[in-house]
Amino acid sequence: MKRNKQLLSLIASAAALVLTLPVPAARAASVPYSSPYTAEEHSATARCNTAEEAAAVLREKLREHETEFSIPVLYNIAGSKAKVDAIIEAAVAETSSGSEGDYIRYSFDAYGYSTEPDWLTRTTQIAFTVAYNTTAEQEKVLDLKVREILDRLNVYDAPDIVKISSVYDYVVRNTTYSQELTDNVIFSAYGAAVNGDAVCQGYSQLIYRLLKDLGVSCRIIPGSSEEVNHAWNLVGINGTYYYLDATWESLLGSSDYVFFLRGSEDFDSIPGFNTHSFKAMPHESTPLNEEADSGRLLSQYRIAKYKYNREIRSSLGDVTGDGAIDAADATMILQAYANMSVGKANGLSEEQAADADADGDSFITPSDATLVLKYYTYLSTTVKPVDFITYVNDEK
């Protein structure tokens, strides 16, 4: 990310509390929050009697990319800046939806609000003005594109590792790092998915949207790389979290996925390449950044120290399940790869898919078939055979 979107200005007047806050481009989200209320439960003029109701209404309006709106609340709910900020923080908190939580948080370009109390009706109007990186119309186009991508990947019922691998592979292969910084759309999932052109925030927001919609725990992480603002992702597998950086992966042009499912100790182990520094950007405090500023963002997750290593299966390489590792297994691997290359399901069961990933990179590719064939040839030419796992480790 080549521009700093962290500048903030606070304007207060005697008549009403007024905030104008340009929003950071790479920030974090608040503590997990869930409300029983929805925006539909309130009419345009209905007063919210609790902070939870107000947060639910605000969340829905932000989802819809409304730019100017007011939320009437019981007067004491918005009686101070801290109370209004708490409503905003709750509105952008993590939920199970890919279009809420961090997705909303990273959709902002700038926002502001003012409060106007009416003591006669015991109501305060919170008037918001919001600028986004995309329009409401673009978000509707993105919704359709997200569904198209997920249907093409067809991993709805797959294990989380397969979902993560498929999404990461898609974004890396189909998004180019933008060199044009004049349009805010490059900071969005729309830029990455529809235009195929985005900076790190767009990459990260698209991965977040896709994985969350697939039911995978995911966050967007703010920070810097070589003193330049940067964003990447944190994803969970069985309660343990790993880092992803699709931006640097696509720039590196590697097929080895070196920034895929890395831990805190080896995320930056690539010689001569950019490093990652988690930090809150320099700015005045705002509810959009509180979780990152306070350190709660990373502290609430169990982050692995080292890269993800799937469990080694004794049947690795034996895709047919006939007890032998031979050309028939390689054929099944190549067929699975051919299916996925045209957007179809791989045609394998979960167990077969795990056994087909011979090189352990979490992807089924021709390199897995090559390993199987090399091992088959090795067995036919040696008098001292070793098992397939030993052979693969020796090859690495």
Image: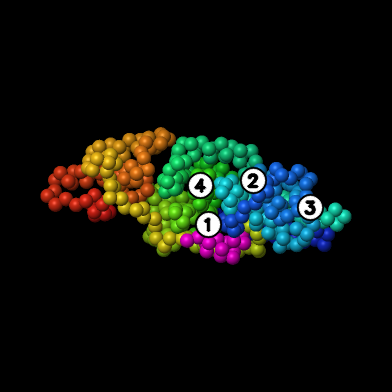
Nearer mark to the viewer, of 1 and 4: 4
Q: Which corner quadrant holds the N terminus?
A: bottom right
Task: Give the mark, 2 or 1, whose residue is nearer the N terminus.
Answer: 2
Q: Residue furthest bottom?
A: 294
What residue is shown with label 2?
63
Crowd around label 1: few <14 · some 14–19 · many ≥20 (10 Å): many
Q: Position of residue 107 (x, y in %)?
A: 61, 49
Identify the residue under disc 1. 221
Distance from disc 1 to disc 4, alpha carbons, whole Å, reads 19 Å
| Amino acid beneath label 3 | Gln
Give the spatial CA distance, label 3 vs label 2: 20 Å
Along the line of sight, the residue nearer the viewer: 57 or 140? 57
Marks 2 and 4, Cα distance to the nearest angstrom?
A: 19 Å
In the image, taking residue 319 as reference, residue 80 lies left or right, namely right
Instruction: Indicate whether residue 348 is drawn in magenta.
Output: no
First in sequence, mark 3 or 1: give its number: 3
Which numbered disc, 2 or 1, marks the residue closer to the eye?
Answer: 2
Q: Estimate the x, y position of residue 281 in percent, counting from the top left.
A: 58, 62
Q: Are marks 2 and 1 in contact (CB under 8 Å)?
A: no
- Residue span colored magenta: 289-302
Report whether 291 appears left or right of 46: left
Residue 91 coordinates in the image, percent (x, y): 65, 53
- Secondary structure under the numbered disc 2 in the rendered image: helix
Position in image of residue 66 (x %, y %):
69, 44
- Residue wearing tag 4: 215
What's under tag 1, amino acid-wise? Ile
Residue visible at 78% across and 50% down in the picture: 47
Give the label on residue 125, or none: 3
